[in-house]
Image (spheres, grey):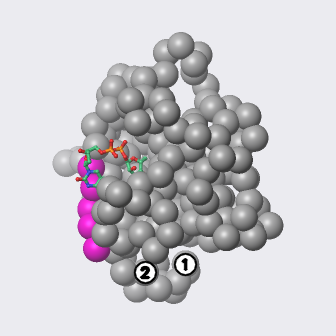
Amino acid sequence: MEYKETEIKGVWIIEPNVFDDSRGYFFEAWKAGEFEEHVGPIHFIQDNESKSSYGVLRGLHYPKGEFSQAKLVRVIKGRVLDVAVDIRKSSPTFRKHVMVELSEDNKRQLFIPRGFAHGFLVLSDEAIFTYKVDNVYAPQHEAGICWNDPDIDIHWPIDSKNVVTSEKDLKAPQLCDADVFE
Ligand SMILES: Cc1cn([C@H]2C[C@H](O)[C@@H](COP(=O)(O)OP(=O)(O)O[C@H]3O[C@H](C)C(=O)[C@H](O)[C@H]3O)O2)c(=O)[nH]c1=O
């Protein structure tokens, strides 16, 4: 696998080595030792999976405080634009974001450390999104930031009238009003 740190320190793009043959393909999707060698120690405790259709935008979400989660995300069907936003007020990249296309074709992964809001927009008819997290799910500590916050200025390639979000996400505050990390 190839590990490349993005312009935001701590956020990594991981490109797997894919072995194609007449039967299909094989690749190592997760390798603890190699990850630790390149990125650092991590202890994932849960795998998640969601399926969404075109135009669905899940996010921007983050669990608050001690329930913050690091995530290793990838797409096993379809194509999404994945976004990680640095919401640590003391960070030199506070409010900055990374946007990466993840798809069944590129098999690319994005590692998002704790202290970030995360979201993705589905660009294909359907997308199956799967990811590892390093902390328990604590619904009462879940928080969000609105996907179209002008201060973050994410250039989602979709007309806002075609975006499909959850009721919860429709009510998310802007970053300036959100309870973020110090
Ligand atoms: C995250 C999570 C959810 N759920 C249940 C709670 C709801 O009944 C249902 C859907 O939850 P939610 O609407 O929060 O799912 P997403 O909108 O995909 O949220 C996720 O999407 C963004 C992109 C993320 O990065 C987070 O992992 C997470 O916030 O699954 C669980 O039972 N366990 C869990 O760990």
Ligand 1 has an atom within 8 Å of the beta carbon of the residue at disc 1: no
Count up the numbered dots.
2
Name which residue lies at 74% across and 68% down: 91
Q: Is residue 47 left or right of residue 17?
A: left
Residue 96 colored magenta? no
Q: Is residue 58 left or right of residue 44?
A: right
Q: Which amino acid does label 1 sit on?
A: Val
User: What SS does tag 1 mark?
Assistant: loop
Q: Which amino acid does label 2 sit on?
A: Ile
Circle 2/circle 1 CB separation < 8 Å: yes
Residue identifier under label 1: 39
Q: Residue furthest right?
A: 92
Q: Does residue 33 show up?
A: yes
User: Residue 42 bears which disc, if any?
Assistant: 2
In this view, 153 is above or below 64:
above
Q: Is residue 18 left or right of residue 82?
A: left
Q: Main secondary structure of the magenta part?
A: strand
Q: Does residue 70 show up?
A: no
Name which residue lies at 46% across and 74% down: 66
> Which numbered disc, 2 or 1, marks the residue closer to the eye?
2
Q: Which of 87 and 57 is in front in this view?
A: 87
User: Residue 75 bears which disc, if any?
Assistant: none
Q: Nearer the viewer, residue 170 or 12?
A: 170
Magenta stretch bounds: 45-49
Residue 175 horizontal/vertical position (percent):
66, 47
The picture quadrant where one finds residue 47 is: bottom left
Name which residue lies at 48% across and 56% down: 62
Residue 149 horizontal/vertical position (percent):
67, 36
Q: How crowded is mark 1: few (under 14 residues within 10 Å), some or many (20 or more)?
A: some
